[in-house]
Every structure is written in structure tokens, then in C-alpha cells.
Amino acid sequence: MSVDAALLEGVELFRALDANERISLAGSMDLRPMRTGDTLFRLGDPGDSLFVVRRGLVELFVNDHAGQEIILHQVSPLNAFGELSLLDGRPRTATARVLEGGELLVLDRDDLLGLIRRTPDLALDILAHMSAETRRADDLLRSRVARNVNMEADEKLTTVQRIADWCAWFSGSVTFLLLHAVWFVIWVLINTTGVPGFTQFDPYPFGLLTMIVSLEAIFLSCLVLISQNRQASKDRVRSDVEYEVNVKAEMEVAHLHEKLD
């Protein structure tokens, strides 16, 4: 389907073009529909086209050595992608998947190179676009470094979880044990021997004390379980991080062996 030159207005990559050049470019482009879930290209495919999202949303991702998806970028309307492989003629460096259906503007490699020869300023815009993608990839690499599990877990704590952690910590301390020992001794003395100035409000077999301790045990056990569940979640994240680090170390060792061989 042919492209109306008006569709190119607002596309950042083609801002260096004037009206006539946009009309010429529109004659070289195709308008294609895209459906949610479609894969536009995969990692390693030949790079023979540049894409501009007219409507919809496209996600670029790769899979790491552990098989996990790494989201590189989500391309919104009026933004281009696929220019890297188009310029150097090498295979695609990522996989493009459609998140929201819409329309794509497609430009072939020969048409783009001819347009760059006629409009050198377009090359600067493409370089600026590639620079922004490189900076985004750098930020992503920094975030892929082994994570601090404790910091990540602390950042997501709710008020109830903080209270549960504190109660679990305090209930396992010597202070907690001594306070309860003193409390029980005083309670028993008051209600058995009769301390001057105090009435025996809970005589043997100390039914009120038993009820209070039972209620305390119920609430304390719930809080400890909440804290343990959070600790289990933290341990799962730690296991994932250790697995990622082991995979990275394995790849580095294999690379070193290749160099030694």
C-alpha cells in the first residue's frame, strides 16, 4: 500500500527533509498493517528494511544466555527502528514483536541509502537516533549488573512487612526472653503470694495470663510467618542472581579457554 506524504510529518528521523523530499520518500515506502503478537523480524534475520511505527507499539528484545528476555526498547508511534542492520548490511541484532496492533511504514535499504546521498543531513539525524539507542543500551547494561538483593527487597517493603520483620527480630532476642521472664515472675508472685498494695486479679491457674499469652503467640506467629515468606522471596531472588552470575562466569571462562586455545 502506498504512503501519503502527510503520514511522514512528525517522524523525528525525517525531520531534516523538506516537503518535496518527504513526497519523494513517501513514494518509496510501503504502509503495512501489523497485528498484536506478530514478529516483524528475529535476531539474525537479514536487515533489509527500516520500519517506522505509524500506529501501535513494537517491542525490541533479545534473550540472554540464561534464556531470559531482555527488553531493549519499546517503539512508540512516529519512531523508527531497524536502521542499524539496514546501514551496515549485517543481520538483525534483536527481535521485534508487536505489542499493540497498528500500522508500519517500511523503507527498503536501497531507497534509504539513495535518500541519504541526496540529503546528507538525514545521516546526522540517523546518527543521533543511533546514539540515543546506544545510550539506552548502556543504561540497560548497567542495570544488568548483579543486583543487591537486600537493597531491592528493602525498597519494596510495606509497613506491615517492616513491622513483621521487627517483631521477628525482637522475638528472637535475649531482651524479649528476659522481659517475658520478668513479666511472668511478677504476675505469678502477685496472684499467689499476695504482694502488698496489689490484689490477686488472676488467681491460679492464671486463666487471664494463659489467654494473653495465647493471643500473643497467635499474632507473633503470623508476623514471623510474614517475615519468613518475605525472606523466602528474597532467597529466590538471590538464587536467580547467583544463577545469572554463574552463567556469566561460565561464559567468561569459556571465552578465556577459546583465547588460550
Image: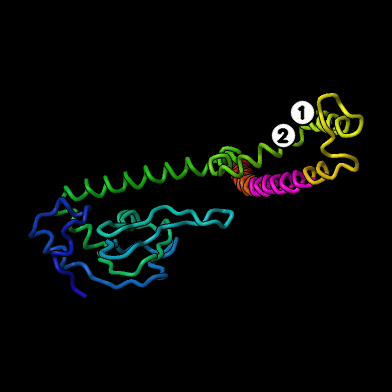
User: As rendered, which of 32 and 235 lies closer to the eye?
Assistant: 235
Whether residue 210 appears in this view of the structure is yes
Q: Position of residue 203 (x, y in %)?
A: 88, 39
Q: Position of residue 242 (x, y in %)?
A: 65, 45
- Classify 62 as above or below 260: below
Instruction: Classify mark 2: helix, strand or loop.
Output: helix
Q: Which residue is mark 2?
A: 170
Q: Are marks 2 and 1 in contact (CB under 8 Å)?
A: yes
Q: Amino acid type of disc 2?
A: Phe
Q: Badge 1 local density, few (<14 within 10 Å), some, or many (20+)?
A: few
Quadrant of the rendered image containing residue 49? bottom left
Q: Which residues are magenta?
A: 214-234
Residue name at image x 21 percent, y 56 percent: 11
> Which disc number belongs to residue 175?
1
Residue name at image x 22 percent, y 48 percent: 125
Residue name at image x 28 percent, y 67 percent: 104
